[in-house]
Amino acid sequence: MYSWQFDAPSGVFKNHQMSSKLRMAAIAETKFMQFVMPEPGYGKQKGESITITRVSNITVPTNARLSELGRIPEDDLVLSTIAITVSEWGRSVPYTSLSNDLSKFDVSNVIQKKLRDQMALVMDSAAADAFQAGKIKAIPTGVAALTFDTDGTPSSQATVNLNVYHVEQIRDYMASTLNVPAYSGDEYICLASTKACRGLKSDPAWEVWHKYTDPAAKYNGEIGKLEGVRFIEIKNTAALSGSLGLNGVLGEAVFFGDDAVAMAVAEDPELRAELPKDFGRQKSVAWYGILEFGQIWGDSASAGEARVVHVTSS
C-alpha cells in the first residue's frame, strides 16, 4: 500500500515509498589487464624499480663458412636494460556514520563497489597506455594504404578506418619484418576499439572471409580470428580512442605478440578502510596500490625486439 499525504495544507501530493533495489551506473569492460603479467622477482622491500635485462640478437652473417687456417670470427653479444619505476595509486571516498545509519542502503558497501569499479578502469587505462608507448605506429592513410612510423610518433593523419587490408599488412609486418613471436600458438592478439572493430565488420572482404569459416560471426557481432590475429573488442574509450584521424574516422587498436608489457607490483591494488575519526563519525574507504606498467621493448623498433604495433594517427 502507498501512503499519500499533503506536504502542506494545500499543495502537491508526494510519495515516501522508496524502491528496495539500488541501481548502479554501468562501467566499460576492462580487458587490457589480462594481457599484462607481474614481473617475477619484484615485490615489497625490493626498491622503487625493477631493472629488466634484455638480450639482443647476434648479427647473422651472410656467409659463415670458414677457411682452413683462418680463425673463427667473433660476434658481440649485446645486452640492454629497461627499468620500471613504481608509483603509488589510489582514490578515496569519505562518508559519515550518520549517512550510513539513516540510509535505506548500506553506504559502505555502495562505496566499496564503486571504488572497485574505478580501480579496474584506472588500471585498465594505465595498462593500455603502456601498450601504446612503443616505437611502431601504423596509420591507415587509405583504403589500400598503410604508413608505418618507427620513431614512436605518428607523422601522418589517418583518413580511413581500420580494414582487412590493413590487418593483412600489419600481420605480415609483425611476422616477417619485426619477427614478433606469437602470443599463443601461432596467434597474435589485437585489442581494438569498438570503432576499429566496426571498420573491420563493415569491410566486404571481412564478410567474404567469414562466409565459410564463421557464418555466425556477423550475427553474433564478433570478429574472431582473422589472418592469424585474434581480435578482442575494447569498449573503454579511456583505454582506446574511437575518434582519431580525419573527422574522427579511425578507431585506435594495438597488435602484439608474446611478452609485450610487464607490470611491476610492490603492493597489489586493494580496498582499505581508514580508521574512523571524531569518535567514529567520520569514515572513509580507499583503494591503494604500488605498481607500474612498462613495455619491455618499448624503446626499440628493431626486428626481434619490438613486440607491439599501435594503430593511431597524428
Image (cartoon, grey):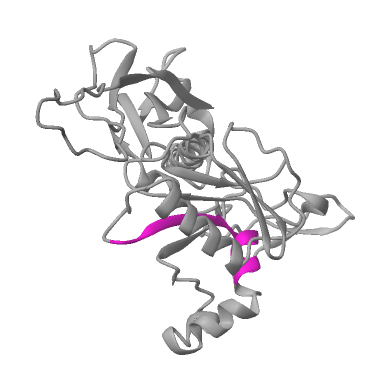
Q: Nearer the viewer, residue 206 or 7?
A: 206
Magenta-drawn stretch contains 199:
yes
- Say whether residue 52 is visible: yes
- Say whether residue 23 is visible: no
x, y percentage for residue 245? 76, 49
Pick the quarter of the image with the C terminus.
Answer: top right
Looking at the image, the residue that sits furthest to the left is 68
Residue 160 occupies quadrant: bottom right
Pick the quarter of the image with the N terminus.
Answer: bottom right
Residue at position x 33%, y 20% from top?
80
Tally of numbered tags: 0
Q: Is residue 43 left or right of residue 7?
A: left
- Relative to 280, residue 198 above or below: below
Q: Is residue 143 left or right of residue 34?
A: right
Looking at the image, the residue that sits furthest to the right is 10
Magenta-drawn stretch contains 182:
no
Residue 207 occupies quadrant: bottom right
Residue at position x 57%, y 77% from top?
206
- Relative to 217, residue 137 above or below: above
Magenta span of residues: 186-200
Residue at position x 31%, y 29% from top?
56
Q: Is residue 19 left or right of residue 276?
A: right
x, y percentage for residue 74? 21, 22
Q: Nearer the viewer, residue 120 or 262?
A: 262
x, y percentage for residue 158? 73, 51
x, y percentage for residue 249? 75, 57
